[in-house]
Amino acid sequence: MRKNIYLESDQTGARLREIRLAKQMTLLQFYLPITKHIGNCSSIESGRRNIGKRLSKDIIDYHKINPRYLNTGMGEMFTRSSDPDEHLPQLEEGVPYFNVNLTEITVGELNVFQEPPEYYVNYRPFNDCDAYLPVYGDSMYPKFTNGEIIIVKEIKNREIIQWGEAYLVITDEISNNITTVKLLFEHQDPERILLRSLNPDYIGDTVLERKAIKRIFLVKGKVTRNHL
């Protein structure tokens, strides 16, 4: 049974506009085959109006939009069509590389995923991941050294954590908008987890409330810049 797809992100309207412009279509061309309420669609794109579940599903289905991209800004903009005659923009292959210093992100979100990547990395073992990101600093030495690049995959089910593995964790304002790569360990309180550096020069664990985590990514691998 097919699940209904609907959109929750406050960036949905802006992404719909990006998709429409990528297809080089006007508001009428893009929305009229789906709805007669073009004014409402203009308000959705500008962020003045929320999009309904039914309309979002109809737009996704008609224009063959990747729901993951529309919700998160990650992945390909469109799903791949089986119709060779259908005109869609050329899709990039692989996983995006974002040249950003994670330690300088202080807003509690990876807004970098909303920006165009520098390039895409097409390496099959990691093509199910979400991003390539550089590591700066030595808190995770020798597992990750300064200048190496990690490959991350977002975790949707936060109840399943691979203890002792490295994760990229982004927290809310209450937890000081932490954005960090650390090893995760189980805490005696099931509502909390431990963040630990690998470098012995960084002494002490960080205790984090599970509910403070806004986004969490498993670090599935690493490469050096020479490998890209």
Image: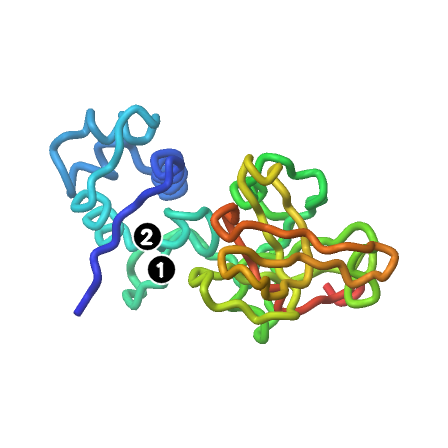
Residue type at mark 2? Ile
Q: Residue at x 40, y 36 (%)?
A: 11
Q: Nearer the viewer, residue 45 or 53?
A: 53
Report the front residue among 203 and 89.
203
Who's the residue at 41% across and 51% down the image? 69
Q: Residue at x 34, y 35 (%)?
A: 13
Q: CA distance from mark 2 to mark 1?
A: 6 Å
Q: Which residue carries the number 2 mark? A: 65
Percent position of residue 90, x then y: 45, 55
Is residue 24 shown to the viewer in this render?
A: no
- Which residue extends farthest bottom? 125
Q: Which residue is outermost to the front?
A: 188
**Residue 25 - label:** none
Q: Earlier in the sequence, mark 2 or mark 1?
A: 2
Task: Report which quarter residue 176 is drawn in.
Answer: top right
Indicate left or right for 185 with 87 as reference.
right
Q: Nearer the viewer, residue 73 or 117?
A: 73
Image location of residue 102, percent across then percent down: 68, 45
Dividing the picture into quarters, in which one does residue 183 lie?
Answer: bottom right
Q: Residues within 10 Å of mark 2 (few under 14, many from 20)?
A: some
Quadrant position of residue 135: bottom right
Element marked by disc 2? loop
Look at mark 1 in the image and give the residue it sits on.
79
Residue 161 appears at what percent x and percent y?
A: 53, 67
Q: Quadrant of the N terminus?
A: bottom left
| Amino acid found under the numbered disc labelled 1 | Thr
Q: Is residue 144 above or below residue 209?
A: below
Q: Mark 2 and 1 residues: CB-CB less than 8 Å, in contact? A: yes
